[in-house]
Structure formats: C-alpha cells, structure tokens
Image (spheres, rainbow, N blue to C red):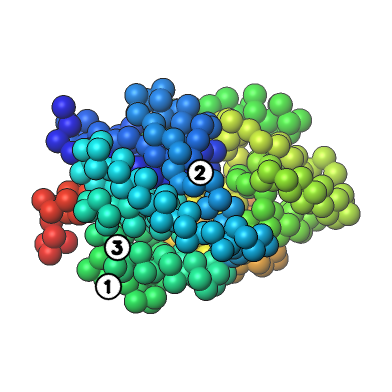
C-alpha cells in the first residue's frame, strides 16, 4: 500500500502534450510511495488510458461552464460570465469534499484551469497543493485576468509550483511568486522505448520518399503559433538550394480549425513544393516517422515551455533545428546537439537545415550528442525521482531548504 495518496486534477479529457506527460509520470511513480487518482470533467481518451493503468477516475470536476473559459477570453455569453464565480466556488467545494472523503494527502493540478479550482479546493480541504506548470504565463498566452488568477494561486494557495522549465519558472518569479515556492522539474521520456530501431526505409516508402533523400520534418499540432507556415516557407528555400530534399508535416489542426490546414496546403502549392512536402495528417506513430528524418524542425513563434518533441528526436539520435525561445535552449545545446534560430525566421531556419543536409557527418555528431544529453537530463527515471522529491517536500517530508 502506498504511503501517500495523490488527487491529480486535470480539466481536459483529450490527450495533448501535458496529458501524455502526466500519464508517463503516473506510470513511473514509486507505487510504494505514491498512488494516484484522477479528477476530470467526464469521460474521454485520458480516462480510458488512466483506467487501463489501474488509476481510479472521478468525473464531474469542474462545473461544465468553467470549461468554456479560454486562456485569452472569458467568452461572449454574459450570463455564463456572471455565473463563473458561483461555478468556481461550487467546483472547489465539490473537489474539496472528494479530497477529504477520499483520504487524499495532496492535490496535484496539471492544467491551467485546474490550477485555479484545484488549489482553491486544496485550501478548503486543508491539503497541500502542487501546481504542475506546463505554460509560460505571459500576455502572449493568457489574458490579464487569467495571469492574475494563476500567479495568485501559485503565490497564496499552492504549497509548491513545479514549472517544466527554468524559462517558465523565471516568468512566474517575475510575476511575484517567491522563488522559495518554485522548483523546476523537467518532463521525462522513456529513453529505452525511444531508442528502439525503426524501419527507416518502410516509413519513407509509405510517403514516396527515396531512402537517400535528405528529409526534414515538423511534428505536432498544426496551429499558427507552432509556426508550420514558417516551416513551409523554409522548406521552399531549402528545395531551391537542394532539389532532392524532402519534407513532412506530421500532425493536424485542433478541432474546428481544418481551414487552417487547407491554407497551409495552399501555401505549399503556391511555393511550388508539390510532392516534396507531405502532409501526413494526425498520426499515432509519430515516433516511427521521426526515425526516418534526418533533421527535426521546431518552428514555434511564441515561447514554448519545454517542447517534448525535441527531446524525443534527440533521444533517437536526430539533430534538431529549433526556435530560440522559451525552454528550448534548456533542451538544445546550440551547435552541439542542434541549431537554434530566431523565431519566425524562415531564411535562418532554411540555412540551418541546408547546412545539416550538406554536412551529414556533422548532423550525425549532433544526433549522437543529443542522445547523450537526453539521457543525462530527460530520462524518465531521473525526472520521476526529481518529481517524487518535490512532492515529498510539499508534503513536509522532503528536502525543503536543502534544495
């Protein structure tokens, strides 16, 4: 039987990056030390996977109206906005009752909305609360009201906030959250799983790409701030220099934004890329596709807290070209494991990719250095032990001032 019980709170039931990271963490925690249950609004892919792992799921948290709030807006329904304080209070009370009746020792919030009602519930239940911060909380990502809510919860309600990168931690400190309540803990991946050899030729054959063709790819949701348009523009520049080069965009738009992908495809046609660029759509085998790349490109135009795709690519020995912002420099050692370029700069991105295509020996050396860096900083076993220490600290039995 575990020594401590964690109530993990997440407002989403679809599986995005933060949810995938959460599942990896829950599957790696020491079962003699921690057992976890999940509190979510309803059923979805996240609850299905959690139950497959033996995790108990509690639905009905929070009130449905709170899910309508967006990072940059409260919405247009004035009645709903007027009722948000009531919904917040009701959600916090209901979750506090669960924390108390379920005998949970700590509340762990894993998403921005959950940070607010989850930490308030923990205070009502007189339980310590830990915020797992997956965001860089600034005006580019959040409204002024939401920034105020998040920094207030981190400063006054949470016992400890655990940003995924120092960039995220520095922003919270700049907002006035004491450093004593902040501790960066990196996300980890299963390096053993990521290191398994894949069939490079089969992947390329599926997309009609020759095995000898230089291949660069971008992997992730196709949303504007991820910069897929800049990747496409860079691909066109590279293709002019190296006509044999090929490119893949792995991913799809978020729900309701299919028109954005249609615009990207039109951009590719207008730039004359033709069959040189493949849109794979949503894939469940992104790791397999990454194994066929020569270079992984990260093109975000806004600061990305800790893009796991870069860690995954490095763990497979792939060099990366990435936007120099947010937590990216904490992953990529510029000139050693990959190349950093200014966000939104298609030409500098193209020059970096072209350089690696033209110098395959240098690209291989960067890939090998990236694998070693991933093993040293981002192995799931190491990052999980760091997380366990942080949770023990929040519970009053950890490192405290020794960190």
Looking at the rendered image, the quarter that the N terminus falls into is top left
Q: Does residue 255 appear in the picture of this structure?
A: yes
In what element is the residue under mark 2? loop
Residue drawn at 38 percent across, 77 percent down: 174
Q: Counting residues from the N terminus, which is met first, the one under dot 2 or under dot 3?
A: 2
Q: Counting residues from the N terminus, which is met first, the one under dot 1 or under dot 2?
A: 2
Front-most of 115 and 233?
115
Mark 1 vs mark 2, foreground winner is 2
Is label 1 in contact with label 3 (beta carbons under 8 Å)? Answer: no
Looking at the rendered image, the quarter that the C terminus falls into is bottom left
Residue indicated by mark 3: 157
Residue drawn at 46 percent across, 46 percent down: 62
Residue indicated by mark 2: 12
In this picture, is 196 found above or below 151?
Answer: above
In what element is the residue under mark 3? helix
**In this picture, residue 244 sits left or right of residue 363:** right
Residue drawn at 42 percent across, 49 percent down: 91
x, y percent for residue 35:
25, 33
**In this picture, residue 244 sits left or right of residue 25:** right
x, y percent for residue 384:
28, 42
How many badges with numbers are in the image? 3
Residue 291 is labelled as none
In this picture, is 82 found above or below 32?
Answer: below
**In this picture, residue 41 sits left or right of residue 25:** right
Q: CA distance from mark 1 to mark 2?
A: 28 Å
The crowd level at tag 3 (other Cα within 10 Å; few <14, some 14-19, many 20+) is: many
Residue indicated by mark 1: 178
Mark 1 vs mark 3, foreground winner is 3
Residue drawn at 73 percent across, 57 percent down: 229
In what element is the residue under mark 1? loop
């Amino acid at each position: 039987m575990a020594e401590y019980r964690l109530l993990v709170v997440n407002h989403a039931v679809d599986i995005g990056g933060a949810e995938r990271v959460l599942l990896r963490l829950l599957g790696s925690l020491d079962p003699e030390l921690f057992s976890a249950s999940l509190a979510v609004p309803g059923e979805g892919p996240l609850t299905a996977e959690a139950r497959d792992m033996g995790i108990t799921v509690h639905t009905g948290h929070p009130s449905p109206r709170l899910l309508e709030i967006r990072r940059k807006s409260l919405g247009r329904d004035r009645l709903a906005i007027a009722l948000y304080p009531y919904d917040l209070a009701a959600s916090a009370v209901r979750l506090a009752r669960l924390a108390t009746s379920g005998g949970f020792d700590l509340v762990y919030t894993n998403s921005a909305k959950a940070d607010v009602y989850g930490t308030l519930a923990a205070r009502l239940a007189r339980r310590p609360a830990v915020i797992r911060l997956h965001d860089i909380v600034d005006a580019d990502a959040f409204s002024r009201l939401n920034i105020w809510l998040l920094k207030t919860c981190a400063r006054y309600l949470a016992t400890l906030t655990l940003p995924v990168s120092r960039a995220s931690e520095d922003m919270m400190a700049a907002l006035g959250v004491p450093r004593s309540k902040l501790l960066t803990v990196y996300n980890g991946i299963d390096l053993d799983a990521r290191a398994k050899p894949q069939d490079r030729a089969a992947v390329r054959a599926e997309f009609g790409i020759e095995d000898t063709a230089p291949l660069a790819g971008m992997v992730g949701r196709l949303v504007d701030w991820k910069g897929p348009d800049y990747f496409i523009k860079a691909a066109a520049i590279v293709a002019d220099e190296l006509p044999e080069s090929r490119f893949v965009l792995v991913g799809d738009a978020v729900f309701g934004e299919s028109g954005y992908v249609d615009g990207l495809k039109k951009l590719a046609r207008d730039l004359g890329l033709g069959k040189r660029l493949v849109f794979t759509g949503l894939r469940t085998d992104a790791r397999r596709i990454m194994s066929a790349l020569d270079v992984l490109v990260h093109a975000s135009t806004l600061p990305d807290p800790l893009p796991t795709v870069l860690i995954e690519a490095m763990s497979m020995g792939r060099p990366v070209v990435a936007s120099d912002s947010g937590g990216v420099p904490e992953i990529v050692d510029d000139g050693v494991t990959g190349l950093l370029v200014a966000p939104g700069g298609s030409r500098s991105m193209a020059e970096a990719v072209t350089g690696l295509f033209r110098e395959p020996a240098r690209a291989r050396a960067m890939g090998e250095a990236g694998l070693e860096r991933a093993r040293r900083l981002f192995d799931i076993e190491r990052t999980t032990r760091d997380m366990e220490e942080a949770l023990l600290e929040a519970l009053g039995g950890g490192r405290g001032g020794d960190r």
